[in-house]
Image (tube, rainbow, N blue to C red):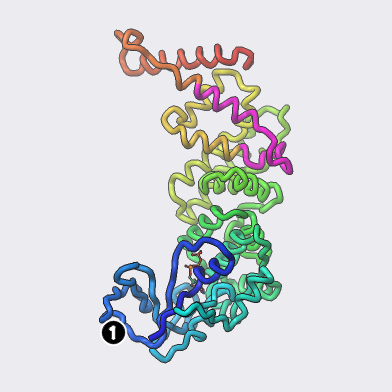
Amino acid sequence: MDIYLVGGAVRDTLLGRPVSERDWVVVGADPATLSALGYRQVGKDFPVFLHPQTHEEYALARTERKVAPGYHGFVTHHAPEVTLEQDLARRDLTINAMAQAADGTLVDPYGGQRDLKARLLRHVSPAFSEDPLRLLRVARFAARYAPLGFTVATETRRLMRDMVTAGEAASLVAERIWQETVRALAEPSPRTYFEVLRDCGALTVLLPELEMSEQRLRGLDAAAAIAASTRVRFAVLLRELGTDLTPLEKPPLPIANEAYGVAVVHAVCDRWRVPTDFRELAELVCREHLRVHHALELPPATVLELLETCDAFRRRERFAELLEACEAGHPEQLGLETLPYPQSTLLTAAFAAAAAVQLTATDRTGLAGPAIGLLLRERRLAALTRWRPTFT
Ligand code: ATP
C-alpha cells in the first residue's frame, strides 16, 4: 500500500502558498485494509476514510466513468489495481493532478508543474467536460490565482464554451452554484470568476438577470480592495446599477428601478437558496443605496428615517455593511479606488450621534411603551439637527 499527498496541498506548496487542507490517495489497498488500520469510512459513493489521529481524508485510488447526465451520473471504480496515474487522470486541472510520495518525490503525469510555471489553468483530459461543476471550479480558481498571473488556457476556454453550448451549465444544481459562487466572492479577484463564466457563456444561464458590465466588475474589485465581507461583495454584485448612474442633481427616488433591483435580488436568492443574511443585505442595498449616495443632501429627519428603515440601532453591523456596499465601486469612485466616500463618514457619524441618545429614568416617568419610542425619536432627531444643523 502506498500513500500520496494529492491535489490542492501539492499545488499550493509548489506555489509557496499556505496549505489549509491535506488530501491523500491510497494505492494498492482495499476498504478492509484501511478499516483494519483504524481508518473510519465516511464516503457514501466512494471509499473515503478519515485517519484515526489526524482526521485527514484518505481516498482509495479510483477511476470515474460518466454513465448518465447530471451530477450523480458517475460510476466510480476502486480496486487495489487502480494506479495513481489513473486516479490523477480523473481530476479537473493539471495543477490539481499532482501527487507527492512519502519520500518527497513528485508524481506529475499531466504537466502540472509546467502549467504552474506558465500560470495556466488547463484541463487534464477531455473527460473534463463530463462534470459541469468544473466550469465553476475553474472560474473560482481563476479568481483565486489571477493576482499571481494565472489565466485559463485557450483550449480549456474552448472546451468550457462547448460544454455550455451543449447545455451543461443548465444542469448545475442550486446548492453547488451558491457554494462555488460564495467561495469565489471571497477570493482576491472575484471579478475574474464572473468574467470566466461570462466568457464561456455560462453566466447567461446562471445569472440571466444581470448585465455583467465593467462597472459591476469594478464594484467587485473595489469591495475586494477594502476586504469587504462576502455578504458585502454579494450585495455589490446584485446592486441595481441603472440607479447608480443617476446624476446627483436628480431627485433620489427612482422607484421603478429600485423595485426592479429588489425583484432581481429575490429571483437570484430564491433560485440559489441564498442564506438570509446575504439576501437581507443585498435587498437593503438595493432599496437604500440611492439615499446613502445622497446622504450629504438629506435633511436630519430623512437621515433618521434611513437609520430606522435600516434597523441601524439594533443591527449596527449590517448598517456598516450597507455603507461599505454603497461605497464599493460607486461611479464617482471608478478607477480611483482611494477616493473618499464622504457619505459613509457622514452617516457613520450621524448614526453615532443618534445612537448616543439615552432616555433617563426621569424622562420615562409616566410614559408607556409607544410614548417612550416617540420621545426617543424626538431626542434623536434633535441630536441629529444639533450635530449637523446645516443638513438642510
Ligand atoms: P481548495 O484549495 O479550494 O480546497 P482543492 O484543490 O484542495 O482546492 P478540493 O475541492 O478540496 O480542492 O478537491 C481536492 C482535489 O480533488 C482537487 O485538487 C482535484 O484534484 C480533485 N477534484 C475535486 N473536485 C473535482 C471535480 N469536480 N472534478 C475533478 N476533480 C476534482
The residue drawn where x is 47% and y is 42% is 280
Q: Which residue is mark 1?
A: 32
Q: Is 302 situated above or below 72?
A: above
Q: Say which element carries label 1.
A: helix
> Residue 390, how many percent across, how many down?
64, 14
Residue 250 sits above or below residue 369 on the image: below
186 in the magenta segment: no
Residue 40 occupies which quadrant of the picture? bottom left
Q: Height in image: 226 above or below 172?
A: above
The residue lying at 68 percent from left, 48 percent from top is: 218
Q: Quadrant of the C terminus?
A: top right
Query: What residue range appears in magenta?
Result: 327-352
Camera sees residue 166: yes
- What is the quadrant of the N terminus in the image? bottom left
Q: Is residue 368 left or right of residue 200?
A: left
Judged from this view, the residue extending furthest toward the front is: 103
